[in-house]
Image (tube, rainbow, N blue to C red):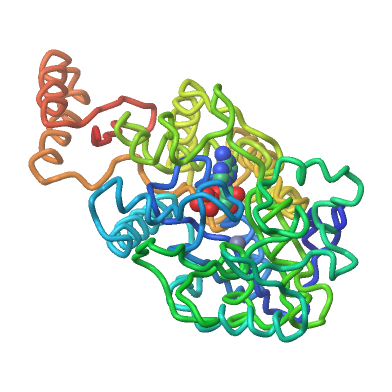
Amino acid sequence: MIRLYNTLTRSIEPFKPQHDTTVRMYTCGPTVYNYAHIGNLRTYVFEDILRRTLKYHGYAVTHVMNITDVGHLTDDADFGEDKMEKGSRREGKTAWEIAAVYTEAFQNDLKNLNILEPTIWAKATDHIDDQIQLVTTLRDKGYTYETDDGIYFDTTKISDYGKLAQLDRQTLKAGMRVEMGQKKNPHDFALWKFSKAGESRQMEWDAFGKKGFPGWHIECSAMSMRYLGEQFDIHCGGVDHISVHHTNEIAQSEAATGKKPWVFWWLHGEFLLLDEGKMAKSGSHAITLQTITEKHIPPLAYRYFLLQSHYRKQIGFRWQALEAAHQGLLRLRRHVVAIPETTVDDLHIMHEFQEAMDTDLNTAEALSVLWRALKENKITQKTVTRCDKILGLDLNTHNEETVPPEIAELLAEREKARAEKRWGESDVLRKTIENSGYTVEDTPAGQTIRKNY
Ligand code: AMP
Ligand code: ZN
């Protein structure tokens, strides 16, 4: 039985999907106006661990992830500029080109981090009709009002607005800072925005008698319900989404369908913090996966770095700690490669590993179980492979990458020189290999080689 922390109830509960063995899961995807930073990627790694754990338990997971390619405004609320249009001006490309470039970059990041691809990718601009339909339903049911700049959801029309964020228990302080425009209440939010008179937007559609575009929250409700039904099992995102984005998604979805709860399980990943504080995607210190690989640290070392902490704990990012994680991962793989053939599984190990994962995805504990088992020679390669189905760290991979034949030949020569204790020659060969852009390390399990990025 998997036990997960549900933000809705603020407690760890045994997980049970609505329909037998299928889990329907929606995860908020990226706004594709720039590269994802490593903070964003932390959230996707956590969601991947959740999905792999469910899969491990035999559930079939239908996983939908959206791509926000329109409607996310710079201040995260209902004002400011559209992030896509801003990206377009920054790079001198169309908003559509910007979306295509950064969607592909994002999908590559996921691949490099061994994050399983969602069952369905849902692009906001491919689902404009679904969103218009949902706004129309809400309007027809009397939940909306119109201002000069859009159609807004009236949050006073529902009795339990803010239940996810427990807004009723906090003062409405957040509302004090909100730019009101013609909004009636601080928490009201735009379902649909009208293009400003005289403004020429690249992404706009005819609806409600004018040109306009969707508000940021409506896409997630419209697309998740299209693919997963009016009620589904799991919805995830980063903790920053609790108080506004997910709160508004719940309000509009439950108002539209009349069914509660819209989603049974809400899971949120904590933030990765830079020393300076919250990491902004547009900020000057945004670190991307590419920044990491440029420093010769492979993406999976970042995954390992993340798995050393629990997903509900903040992590302060430090390069030193990432480098230590990199060395840790290389060591772990060396241990796995060196497992003697004669090893027999200690049956408790897999049980402990699974128990750790089932206890609200405690990857840190699961890794320490694995380390202990390896050091005490209690785990076979086959069982490591099973653990790695959840961890996704390529643990049965030799650290050597596939190298070009000429480098492989040099490595073989060096192997021979070392075996015959011709140390001078071995050093010369190491230099030659390194000059070709590789780093060679000698370990108890033999030579390892990695490409310098
Ligand atoms: P965005 O592309 O800005 O919509 O964010 C994509 C995902 O990253 C969302 O689920 C956010 O909650 C999450 N996120 C943003 N910043 C961070 C951070 N510093 N650490 C972890 N997750 C983050
Ligand atoms: Zn969302």
**Can you give x and y, in whole percent of width and height, for residue 218 in the image?**
61, 70
Figure disc tally: 0
Q: Is residue 102 left or right of residue 229?
A: left
Q: Is residue 95 left or right of residue 50?
A: left
**Can you give x and y, in whole percent of width and height, for residue 292 in the image?**
37, 34
* 368, 250: nearer the viewer: 250
* 411, 282: nearer the viewer: 282
Q: Is residue 45 visible in this depiction of the protein?
A: no
**Can you give x and y, in whole percent of width and height, for residue 362 in the image?**
71, 45
Quarter of the rendered structure image containing ligand 2: bottom right
Q: Which residue shows up at 24% across the image and 36% down it?
A: 451
Vertical side of 150 occupied by 128: above or below: below
Vertical side of 431 occupied by 285: above or below: below
* 286, 417: nearer the viewer: 286
Residue 398 sits in which quadrant?
A: top left
Q: Which residue shows up at 73% across the image and 51% down it?
A: 243
Q: Is residue 104 visible in this depiction of the protein?
A: yes
